[in-house]
Amino acid sequence: MALESWPPSATWAVVALITLYIAARHLSSRKQDPREPPVVPSTVPYIGHLLGMALYGGRYLKEIGIRHRETTPIFTLPVPNSRIYIVTDPSLAAAVQRASKVLSFTPIIPEVTERILGLDKATVEIARKNLDPAPGDEKGFLFDIQQMVYDWLGPGDYLGVLTAAAANQLKAEVADYIGALRTGKVDAKSVDLLEWVRHCVTVATAQYLYGPENPIAKDPTLEKAFWDFDHGLGMLLMNIVPSITASSAYSGRERLVAALADYLEAGHYKTASKIVQERVAIALQHGWTLRATARSELSFLFAGIVNLTTSTFWILLQVFADPELLQTVRSEVEAVLTTEDDGSAQTLALEDLKNKCPVLHAVYRECLRLNSDNNSVRVVKEDTILSERWFLAKDCVVQIAGGVIHADSSIWGSDVDTFDPKRFLAEVKGKERQVHPAAFRAFGGGKTLCPGRHFAMNEILSFVALVVLQFDITGANGGRIEVPRKNDAVLPVHILEPLVPAIVSMRPREGWDGGRDLRLVLKRS
Ligand code: HEM
Ligand SMILES: *[C@@H]1O[C@H](CO)[C@@H](O)[C@H](O)[C@H]1NC(C)=O
Ligand SMILES: CC(=O)N[C@H]1CO[C@H](CO)[C@@H](O)[C@@H]1O
């Protein structure tokens, strides 16, 4: 009997594959420890979850999370040689944040920055040193710089100084644009609102952080280079021959780095903001070259621009899309506007925007809730039992699923998917059930809480106030504004962008006296 006649080889292959599949699925979904969180197997064994994330972006994890959050506050995704533990419950998220000694973000920083910023090996070696120093240990570069940035951007005098600088820079951008509209230099019947906000924020941020000699002021084509870099971040992170697979992000980054390096070497940082001067001083103390420091400064410029831009965009769009909301927000802002005795100027105190404009504030929070899907990531440094119950294995990864928590109807109510700033107003008045403090995740939490959060809020509220006071914005051709859906099929590295551009028409606001100066101050005197 010829061997190949029976059983037919095709059938054999199928049987072998199915057996292998079942075995692999079984093996890969086995718990390593009985206390390990429930395992969610993938359809394709081993690589299925990675494949899902690569194909469907953040939406993949988010959908799995939403499916399982009612049965378990944490679950395990098996991936090749490792596990990803996904936390979908705010109080367990808070437990992860508290366990910062064993569940730490810092081990990831050097590798992530090496990939995203293209740091050379020698600099990465410096960055790896003394990441989590014990008291009395020598402090590493990352430790020193984080400590300084958290300090300086925390509540205090410097926060006020930087806020005023940023707000006045944005005011100048807005004034330029209104000037161009009035003289007919630009026609604003169909403006891509996100592009417009991007331009204002990019130019203003480069200016208030890096001073008049900043590279973007010297070479405006670097503005596009910046956004090319931003949009290729996911591919740069994968790091597979980035000069080819992420070519425009790569060349955008390298152009910016070269310009920043020239700026630093020319000593222009001495005319920069105090916080940038201090960052450069710390890098030099730790033996960084100025050319390597340019890469670290690109990351700071990035942190100051990207999320601020996209959140401001959503806030403006939502406010102008709803005439009633627009009216409420305008009257809140106008109520804190004071006119000088001689009528020559009006003054807006930035502190009042924060404390006396509850609806504006609620819109800000709601836009961040709806559009931040990013996860907080931690590495398990040793085998750990979390909350006396869940076993987490060494070298695996824990992610707090921000997108899942922000879309949890048991936290936010049954209308969780719709834009409704009132849910935050109710919270202020104490009417609604209290939301767990770790449930609002736009700024991360625990050790990776954004150091720029106070500053970002100040800057966003002042930018929105400037636009609301001085512009009328409608849909293209004067129609209603349609709010596009967010694009959640990408790996979320920042606040999500719209799926399609929001095209609007912008005019100087009718009835607003543009002849008077609008002064921005911190506090009312
Ligand atoms: C709406 C605006 C913003 C949001 C939603 C936001 C959110 C975040 C989050 C979630 C992180 C933690 C990242 C992680 O876990 O890896 C972070 C880090 C950071 N943010 Fe923000 N951010 C915003 C604006 C800003 C601004 C305006 C600045 C200021 C200049 C800033 C400075 C930073 C810095 C320096 C870090 C890195 C901290 C570190 O070294 O660990 N952010 N931001
Ligand atoms: C931007 O915001 C997202 C979502 O909240 C966050 O995960 C990310 O780390 C932030 N990025 C920066 C550079 O601040
Ligand atoms: C899960 C995920 O996409 N996390 C990302 C959140 O954002 C930071 C950068 O801001 C990335 O490094 C993470 O990978």
Image: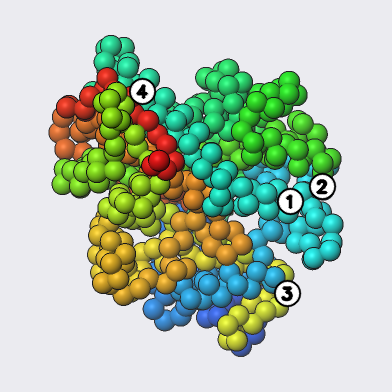
Q: Amino acid at mark 2?
A: Ile
Of labels 3 and 1, earlier in sequence is 1
Q: 347 or 497, which is in the foreground?
A: 347
Q: Which mark is residue 175?
A: 4
Q: Amino acid at mark 1?
A: Asp
User: Quadrant location of the N terminus?
Assistant: bottom right
Which residue is denoted by mark 1 in the rendering? Answer: 144
For the residues carrying marks 2 and 1, which lies nearer the camera in this image?
1
Which residue is denoted by mark 3 in the rendering? Answer: 382
Residue sitting at x 28%, y 67%: 429
For the residues carrying marks 2 and 4, which lies nearer the camera in this image?
4
Which residue is denoted by mark 2 in the rendering? Answer: 126
Residue sitting at x 31%, y 61%: 424
Q: Which mark is residue 203?
A: none
Q: Amino acid at mark 3?
A: Glu
Of labels 2 and 3, earlier in sequence is 2
Residue 138, by quadrant, is bottom right
Of labels 2 and 4, earlier in sequence is 2
The relative height of residue 370 versus residue 216 in the rendered view (above or below) is below
Within 8 Å: ligand 1 and the Cβ of disc 4? no
* Residue 294 in sight here: yes
**Label 3 to label 1, Cα distance in Å?**
25 Å
